[in-house]
Amino acid sequence: MPDMDGPTYFIVTQSPGPKWVEGVVYNEQPEFGVHVAYMEEVFNTGNVVLSGPFMESPGGVMASGGMTILKNVTLDEANSIASEDPTVKSGMLNANVTPWWIPFHD
């Protein structure tokens, strides 16, 4: 039975921004290390459920973009986390935040 008071998580999807270098895979983008360092900081807050890049195929090449699922934050905090990513600020990545209600969970 669904939990009608289930938590709301926030999904942050990252996609190529205007400064994305076409033809260059995600982990070879000029600011990839900056993005990873920022995501490590966010992860260390304890509010990250899952985070990582999309893949072209299992075990294959990273696709263009990724996703982070946040818990225990407000919509404003999720938007701040997304917009404060230095690679979003620089234009390498775009970020979109979507609330996700979780009626089915452990």
Image (spheres, rainbow, N blue to C red):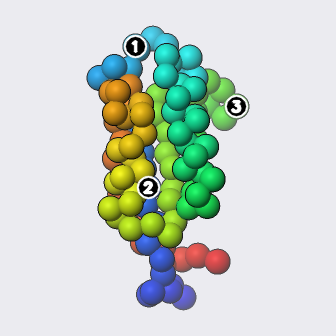
Q: Which mark is residue 11?
A: 2
Distance from disc 2 to disc 1, alpha carbons, whole Å, reads 25 Å
Please indicate whether residue 33 sits to the left or right of residue 9 in the image: right
Query: Does residue 51 appear in this view?
Result: no
Name the residue carrying label 3: 59
Q: Secondary structure at mark 3?
A: loop
Residue displayed at 58% across by 35% down: 37
Residue 18 image-quadrant placement: top left
Q: Are marks 2 and 3 in contact (CB under 8 Å)?
A: no
Q: Is residue 53 above or below residue 106?
A: above
Q: Nearer the viewer, residue 38 or 13?
A: 38
Query: Tag 3: residue type?
Result: Gly
User: What residue occupies the far left of the structure in this picture?
Assistant: 18
Residue 75 at what x, y percent from top left? 34, 64
Please indicate whether residue 19 sits to the left or right of residue 27 in the image: left
Query: Tag 1: residue type?
Result: Glu
Question: Quarter of the image containing the C terminus?
Answer: bottom right
Name the residue carrying label 1: 22
Residue 31 at what x, y percent from top left? 49, 22
Q: Secondary structure at mark 2?
A: strand
Q: Are marks 2 and 1 in contact (CB under 8 Å)?
A: no
Q: Mark 1, residues whose alpha carbon is within 10 Å: few (<14), some, or many (≥20)?
A: few
Residue 11 image-quadrant placement: bottom left
Query: Tag 2: residue type?
Result: Ile
